[in-house]
Image (cartoon, rainbow, N blue to C red):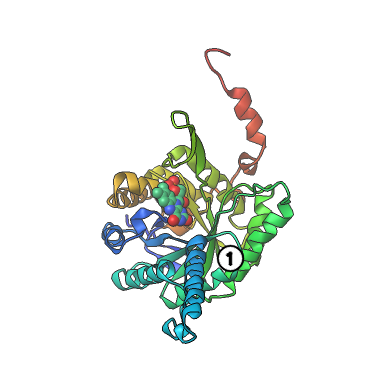
Amino acid sequence: MSVDLRTRYLGLELKHPIVASASPLTSSIDSLKRLQDAGIAAVVLKSLFEEEVEHEEMSAHNLLEYGTELSPEAQGFFPEMQYSTGPDKYLQLIAEAKRALSVPVIASLNGYTPGGWTRIAREFQEAGADAIELNVYFLAASIDDTSAEVEQRYVDLVRSVTRQVSIPVAVKVAPYFSAMANMAARLTQAGAKGLVLFNRFLQPDILLDELEVAPHLVLSTSDELRLALRWIAILRGRIDASLAATGGAHTPDDVLKLLLAGADCVMLASSLLQKGPTHVGTLVRGVQAWMAEREYDSVAQLKGSLSQQSCPDPDAFERANYMKALRSYTSEFV
Ligand SMILES: Cc1cc2nc3c(=O)[nH]c(=O)nc-3n(C[C@H](O)[C@H](O)[C@H](O)COP(=O)(O)O)c2cc1C
């Protein structure tokens, strides 16, 4: 039995739901081509960071200032100099990826302030990106910042990017909001056409030998999947936006669970970094085999069939089973 694996994400038609998340594997044309050869349905390019745009703008600014001190004509040597190598290289990556690939190319912008740098989004569009993923990486560490202010900052940032472009913008956020569902709705009202759940912050560690604080990057395991699973299940059908799952998808079962919860697509970084691009084929075949065995015709039929709205036990995604789960835990020491 043939299974129709097609899905729609951000209005883009994907041949199946497996997408390469932003990672070093999506940072060069060579590895992007390998992902496409392995059958990936779409790619999210590694991010361009706000700091890179700001840094380059500052460098250009300093150069101009310095130049004008030397000679009044000096400015003429630097016409139209807005962004230097960081953004330029990134725009080149988008354009080359579009030329080299037939699958959708999503460019990724990573930042935390709604400043002038967000106009780079328009250049992403002009370079040919099919969509933009806006990764808002911001840790509210100041004791003066209230949750309302922090949330507003997200909304303003999303609005300032979505106003620049006509291509769809998805927002990748972390799960650390007191009222995640409300926040999701506000982000879509601000113009987001999709949510990517969830951003995975790097947690710093302390190196005991060096007595230093260092970033600690560990790849995910399937155990992390349940955070996105719960929120996708809760949000499916409640907000007018595509939902992408990221974090902990490693096996065909992981992908199937996220689709049943209501994900439109499942994004992969760790599993592709560990197993290489050919892992895409293993996942697609595994998903297809499971669906055929259970006589599902299409991903559309499967998608969201265990979301909170469709689930026979909607409480399972909220608090009720928390108590049961804790009370039923046993150990030889209890
Ligand atoms: C080495 C590495 C680099 C990453 N770079 C980016 C990036 O540039 N932008 C971004 O939004 N996410 C980035 N991520 C996060 C991934 O896109 C993904 O959301 C996260 O790793 C969770 O998915 P996973 O469990 O499949 O790894 C990176 C992850 C890793 C491991």
Please, is residue 59 above or below residue 80 in the view?
above
Q: Residues within 10 Å of mark 1 (few under 14, many from 20)?
A: many
Q: Examine the rendering and report whether any part of residue 293 can be seen.
A: no
Residue 333: % across, % down: 55, 12
Q: Quadrant of the C terminus?
A: top right
In the image, residue 145 above or below residue 53: above
Q: Give me the residue at 60% from left, 48% from top.
A: 308
- Give the secondary structure at mark 1: loop
Q: Quadrant of residue 323?
A: top right
Q: Disc 1 marks which amino acid? A: Ala
Q: Quadrant of the N terminus?
A: bottom left
Residue furthest front as drawn: 70
Q: Relative to the observer, which residue lies in front, 39 or 134? A: 134
Residue depicted at 66% across the width and 56% down the height: 183
Measuring 57% from the left and 45% from the top, which residue is drawn there? 230
Left or right: where 82 falls relative to 2: right
> With respect to residue 230, does 18 lie above or below?
below
Q: Nearer the viewer, residue 306 or 281?
A: 281
Q: Along the line of sight, which residue is nearer the eye, 70 or 130? A: 70
Q: Position of residue 50 (x, y in %)?
A: 52, 62
Residue at coordinates 61% horizontally, 66% vertically from top-left? Answer: 114
Residue 185 at what x, y percent from top left? 65, 60
Q: Is residue 292 above or below residue 43?
A: above
> Where in the figure is residue 93, as x and y percent of width and height?
36, 68
Q: Which residue is mark 1?
A: 192
